[in-house]
């Protein structure tokens, strides 16, 4: 081939590659701007929802706006352990916007005499109860967990949740809560044994493990922080021990292997049930309890996680 022709061909290909890169870069920048605009739009909307809720929510990495309502008014003990709100007494509600519609899901921690008036108020204001059950065993006083679902105007959903909470002893939001002391736990060792890391919150080490495949409600994909990730919590109990509780989020074929792994590890089963009524795939939730050496517990919980299709943490 003539050297001049070859040179022209090389220059032409290089120019074409540069245009592709420039086009990709422009598309990426445009997508980034669009995402930023959506975030600003959501931020403006969430400020209004904050006001309706009477507390400030927190934007999660998966785009969900989540509100926490710890039941710090309750002094609950189980198996001689005083349960911190972050271990198993945290009410919450989360909002997800997709394709112009809002879905809200949540879990309200209630005493027995709060259940009926709360369900009635939510129903009156357009929010449905989807499950009611225990997460703990032999606790005192008895606490129950009400799972809720709402769709539509996020302000109206927030107003309904706030009105329902007003019928309970749930404390108002604290503006500047005190920082808890450092956790007396080997959190790095726990994370290594579990294969997933977490974060300290309210004197508890909390780990969240999302499922690998998407979950949909009424055809809309629902992010993991809407209560669809396996939750594993550790609370120090002294003498180099920790209480662990939470829930594994499983498909039907994973239930038996997970229960077998937990019981083989000496971790107790507190309850097995559903939280929703129309999700795809159908999900089952097993709540567990243990109080032992935290690394031993973490290794046992890891054997249960290994029976499930969950996202693998980054190395």
Image (cartoon, rainbow, N blue to C red):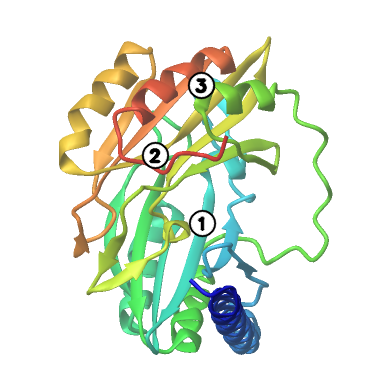
Q: Secondary structure at mark 3?
A: helix
Q: Which residue is mark 3?
A: 298
Q: Is residue 128 left or right of residue 58?
A: left
Q: Nearer the viewer, residue 109 or 27?
A: 27
Task: Answer with left or right where residue 109 lies relative to residue 129.
Answer: right
**Residue 164 seen in the figure:** no
| Residue displayed at 37% across by 30% down | 305
Residue at mark 1 to residue at mark 2: CA–CA distance = 15 Å
| Image coords of residue 112 (percent x, y) | 38, 51
Q: In the drawing, what numbered circle is on residue 247?
A: 2
- Which of labels 1 and 2 is toward the front? 2
- Residue 268, by quadrant, is top left
Nearest-to-viewer mark from 1 and 3 = 3
Q: Is residue 195 visible?
A: yes
Of 171 and 21, nearer the camera is: 21
Disc 2 element? strand
In the foreground, 305 or 232 = 305
For residue 255, which numbered disc appears in the image? none
Q: Nearer the viewer, mark 3 or mark 2?
A: 3
* Chain-order first, disc 1 or disc 2: 1
Label 3 to label 2: alpha-carbon separation: 14 Å
Task: Please give the label number shown on residue 91.
Answer: 1
Label 2 CA crowd tier, 10 Å (few <14, some 14–19, many 20+):
many
Q: Given contact means CB atoms under 8 Å apart, are the residues at marks 1 and 3 in contact?
A: no
Residue ranking furthest to the front: 2
Q: Give the residue drawn at x 50%, y 83%.
A: 159
User: Relative to 243, does residue 223 appear above or below in the rendering?
Assistant: below
Q: Using the numbered discs, state the Cα–Cα distance from disc 1 to disc 3 in whole angstroms.
A: 25 Å
- What residue is shown at x 58% (from left), y 62% (from top)? 61
Examine the rendered structure and indicate whether residue 95 appears above or below residue 62.
below
């Amino acid at each position: 081939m003539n050297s001049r022709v070859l040179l022209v061909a090389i220059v032409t290909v290089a120019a074409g590659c540069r245009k592709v890169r420039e086009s990709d870069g422009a598309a990426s920048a445009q997508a980034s701007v669009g995402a930023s605009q959506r975030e600003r739009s959501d931020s403006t909307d969430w400020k209004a929802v904050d006001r309706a809720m009477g507390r400030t929510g927190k934007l999660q990495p998966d785009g969900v706006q989540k509100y926490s309502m710890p039941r710090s008014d309750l002094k609950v003990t189980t198996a001689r352990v005083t349960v911190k709100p972050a271990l198993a007494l945290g009410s919450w509600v989360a909002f997800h916007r997709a394709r112009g519609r809002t879905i809200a899901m949540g879990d309200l921690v209630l005493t027995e005499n709060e259940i009926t008036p709360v369900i009635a108020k939510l129903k009156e204001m357009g929010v449905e109860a989807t499950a009611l059950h225990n997460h703990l065993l032999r606790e005192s006083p008895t606490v129950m967990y009400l799972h809720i679902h709402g769709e539509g105007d996020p302000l109206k959903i927030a107003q309904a949740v706030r009105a329902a909470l007003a019928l309970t002893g749930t404390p108002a939001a604290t503006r500047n809560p005190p920082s808890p002391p450092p956790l007396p736990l080997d959190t790095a060792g726990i994370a290594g044994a579990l294969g997933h890391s977490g974060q300290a919150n309210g004197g508890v080490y909390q780990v969240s493990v999302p499922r690998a495949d998407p979950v949909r409600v009424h055809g809309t994909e629902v992010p993991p922080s809407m209560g669809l990730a396996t939750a594993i919590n550790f609370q120090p109990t002294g003498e180099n021990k920790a209480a662990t509780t939470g829930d594994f989020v499983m498909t039907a074929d994973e239930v038996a292997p997970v229960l077998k792994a937990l019981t083989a590890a000496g971790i107790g089963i507190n309850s097995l049930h559903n939280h929703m009524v129309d999700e795809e795939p159908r999900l089952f939730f097993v709540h567990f309890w243990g109080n032992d050496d935290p690394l031993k517990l973490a290794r046992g919980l890891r054997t249960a996680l290994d029976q499930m299709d969950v996202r693998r943490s980054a190395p």
